[in-house]
Amino acid sequence: MKEIMTGLYQDHQHIGRLLTILQNKLATLELGSRPNFQLMSDVLDYLEDYGDGYHHPREDLLFGYIRHHHHECESLVNQADNEHQELARLTRALRESVDQVLLDAPFSLQDFCKRLARYIDTQRRHLSFEEQRLFPLIEQYMTMDNWQDFSEKAPYRHDPLEAENRSQNYQQLANALIEDLADG
């Protein structure tokens, strides 16, 4: 149980760092400079692959246990479900916008900045909501049987950005993240 929750919190920390990168790119745009759009695309690809493809489904399964056994929590779980769907949609849309910029398609800087700012804000509010409202419920209500069942239904996948498990696809992103965070 502790390992699973630690993993969820670590995922949130990593997502937070990625959001900081996007926030830095937004600041660059707002100053009138051109940020590294390829890095932005890589961040969004990661959030789509790992965040929407692995992290959120694991959370959804955990939240399902809470919903099933503690009906008073249903509205909170429904909110998380809706936010996961909205975040997946926003991630796809923003990644498509970034990809268009990479293809030198014309774009409205003002609209793009608004979309990026909304995305960052929505992600940050979602992380906070889960950590403050849902993670404590998981820790309170999940039984040993629930944890065992969860482990069988949702096998662990290493975060592809972690050094010891870094996939080739994410090596460049990891290096860029380290440099970008070091530059402030």
Image (cartoon, rainbow, N blue to C red):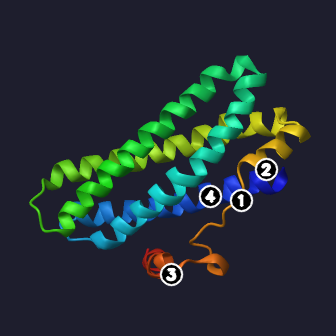
User: Residue at horizontal 75%, vertical 56%?
Assistant: 6
Q: Nearer the viewer, mark 1 or mark 4?
A: 1
Give me the disc on residue 11. Answer: 4
Q: CA distance from mark 2 to mark 4?
A: 17 Å
> Which amino acid lies under the numbered mark 4 shown in the image of this protein?
Asp
Answer left or right for 38 relative to 60: left
* Disc 2 element: helix
- Residue 156's disc is 1
Q: Secondary structure at mark 1?
A: loop
Question: In x, y percent, where is residue 108?
Answer: 12, 53
Say which residue label 2 marks.
151
Asked if the residue under mark 4 is in contact with the one under mark 1, i.e. CB atoms within 8 Å, the reply is: no
What is the distance, in whole Å, between disc 4 and disc 3 at their CAs? 19 Å
- Of the residues under marks 3 and 1, which one precedes in the sequence? 1
* Residue 98 image offset from top left, x and y in percent: 26, 61
Mark 1 or mark 4: whose residue is earlier in sequence: 4
State which tag comes first along the sequence, 2 or 4. 4
Outermost right residue: 144
Q: Is disc 3 surrounded by few (<14), some (14 to 19) or many (20+) residues within 10 Å?
A: few
Contact (CB < 8 A) between labels 1 and 2?
yes
Q: Residue furthest top?
A: 72
Q: Are marks 3 and 2 in contact (CB under 8 Å)?
A: no
Q: Is residue 136 above or below residue 55?
A: above
Q: Position of residue 88 (x, y in %)?
A: 43, 45
Pointer 4 or 3: first along the chain = 4
Residue type at tag 2:
Ser
In depth, the one of 129 and 155 nearer the eye is: 155
- Quadrant in the picture for the C terminus: bottom left
Q: CA distance from mark 3 to mark 2?
A: 27 Å
